[in-house]
Amino acid sequence: MPKLIFLPHEEICPEGALIEVESGTTICNAALKNDIELEHACDQQTACTTCHVIIREGFDSLEEAEEIEEDLLDRAWGLEVESRLSCQAKVANEDLVIEIPRYTINLASENH
C-alpha cells in the first residue's frame, strides 16, 4: 500500500505523520481517517480551497486535476505548481510527501 508522509505543520500535525492507504483514496479522506484534521469547509464538494495541499514528492503519480479543481486552485493561498485540492487528489500506487500550507483562505480572512 502506498504511504502518505505528511510534513510537520505547526497546528494540524506538529510531528508530521506517516500513514498507509489504499490506492484510490483521496488525500483528504486518508488524512481525516488518521486524525489529521485538514480543513474542508465545503465538505469535499470541490467548492472551496481550504483542503489545498502541496505534493512535494510523487505529484506525477496523481491523475491530472480537472478544470474545476484548477480554477479553484487559482484562488488558493500559497499556490505552487504541485498544489492540489486534497479532496480531489486520489492516491495512486506511489508514496506521496505532502505539505499542508501554513494558511487557508478561511484562516487568512479570519485573521484580518
Image (spheres, grey):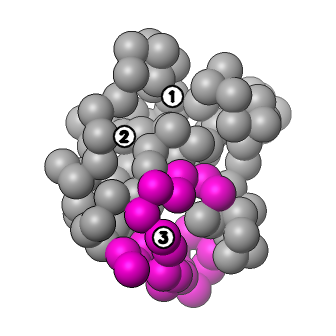
Tag 2: amino acid:
Ser
The image shows residue 33 at horizontal and vertical percentages of 71, 69
The residue that label 2 is drawn on is: 83
Which callout, 3 or 1, points at the residue further toward the start of the chain? Answer: 3
Kind of residue sitting beneath label 1: Ala
The answer for how far apart the CA atoms under marks 2 and 3 are is 21 Å
User: Which residue is label 1 attached to?
Assistant: 76
Residue 21 higher or lower than 42, as above or below: below
Q: Are marks 3 and 1 in contact (CB under 8 Å)?
A: no
Question: Residue 65, located in which quarter of the rendered image?
Answer: top left
Vertical comparison of 32 with 61: above or below? below
Q: Earlier in the sequence, mark 1 or mark 2?
A: 1
Question: Mark 3: which amino acid?
Answer: Glu
Q: CA distance from mark 1 to mark 2?
A: 9 Å
Q: Residues within 10 Å of mark 3 (few under 14, many from 20)?
A: some
Left or right of residue 43: residue 103 = left
Q: Nearer the viewer, residue 79 or 83?
A: 83
Question: Which residue: 51% across, 28% down?
Answer: 76
Name the residue beneath numbered marker 3. Answer: 22
Q: Nearer the viewer, mark 3 or mark 1?
A: 3
Q: Is residue 26 left or right of residue 97?
A: right
Q: CA distance from mark 3 to mark 1?
A: 27 Å
Q: Is residue 67 above or below residue 5?
A: above
Extreme residue in the left direction? 60
Tell me how many marks there are. Answer: 3
Where's residue 83, x and y in %?
Answer: 36, 40
Q: Residues within 10 Å of mark 1 (few under 14, many from 20)?
A: many
Marks 2 and 1: in contact by CB < 8 Å?
yes
Magenta residues, start to end: 1-29
- Frontmost of labels 1 and 2 is 2
| Helix, strand or loop at mark 2 | strand
Instruction: Please tell me whether the stretch drawn in magenta is mainly helix, strand or loop.
Output: loop
